[in-house]
Amino acid sequence: MMEKSLSVLIAEDEPLARETLRDAVMARPELQLCGEAENGLQAKQMIDALKPDLVLLDIQMPELTGLDVLRQIQHRPVVVLTTAYDQYALTAYELNAMDYLLKPFTRERFDAAIQRVLEAPRRLTNDFTEAAVQASQAPQAPLERILVRERGQIIPVQTRQISYLKADAKYTALVTGGKTYLIRLGISELEQRLDPSRFIRIHRSVMVNLDFVRAMKTDEQSQLQMHMDDGAVLTANREVSRQLRDQVM
């Protein structure tokens, strides 16, 4: 069992979120707040100087991201990741994180995360931090799942079940199983993380999963029309159309 008294550093750039975390920490007698960092560079410096037992680490911060902080620190604390965006919660899964907090979170959710930390053997928490550093430095494997929000719930969507994706202003629409989910992640970033043997970007704002293409037909402009399993028809640009036709045996 981990000792029941933990020094805690909060690394969070948003004042309101930092205040929420501070109140939650102060309400737990097992926790002692030792400092607050407002950006990633400050977090790195304070972690190595103060050597906290636990860091509540925001993934998206100015100066350095949370993952940059993990790469560069010498001291290895227990880490609970925090994020305001659904899609970044998948980072916690990729790193086999002790836990993560999706903002805005309830006090009950915070307490549950802290309880996991308190009950974990110290060896496991050290292993997590080392695994996080190694994973953040390693080449990224294709995403296997994306977390989406629906009616107040977080739902994991298997990427192999996504039939196509469409850019929608600041969002990307994922179409899977007859449903459409909006996530705050650009289609260009998703293109870099999805399996290239399965997904192809056929247009500036559209990607398709070839497993869900029923047929391709050439239109009058020599562009391929992708007829999807759900009845949607998506048009590939001329360059992609040419590349696909060149692959025909």
Image (cartoon, rainbow, N blue to C red):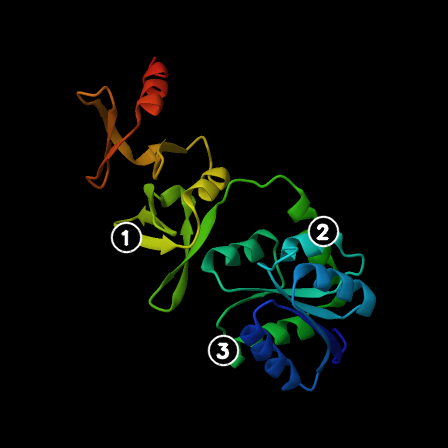
Q: Which residue is mark 1?
A: 179
Q: Earlier in the sequence, mark 3 or mark 1?
A: 3
Residue type (three-letter) at the residue carrying disc 2: Arg
Where residue 16 appears, as percent x and y from the top left, is 54, 76
Quadrant in the rendering for residue 34? bottom right
Indicate which label's residue lies in the foreground, 2 or 1: 2
Which corner quadrant holds the N terminus? bottom right
Q: Earlier in the sequence, mark 2 or mark 1?
A: 2
Q: Residues within 10 Å of mark 2 (few under 14, many from 20)?
A: some
Q: Is residue 37 visible?
A: yes
Assess disc 3: are there few (<14), some (14-19) or many (≥20) residues with their C-alpha within 10 Å of its C-alpha. Answer: few
Q: Tell me the amino acid under the disc marked 1.
A: Lys
Residue positioned most to the left:
220
Tell me if residue 72 comes above or below residue 166 in the rendering. below
Residue that lies at the very extreme toward the top in this rendered image? 249
Q: Nearer the viewer, residue 176 or 243?
A: 243
Label 3 is placed on what type of residue? Thr
At mark 2, the secondary structure is helix
Residue placed at 19% from the left, 39% from the top? Answer: 231
**Nearest the camera: 57 or 77?**
57
Residue identified by numbered label 2: 71
Q: Residues within 10 Å of mark 1 (few under 14, many from 20)?
A: few
Secondary structure beneath disc 3?
Answer: loop
Give the residue pinned by disc 3: 106
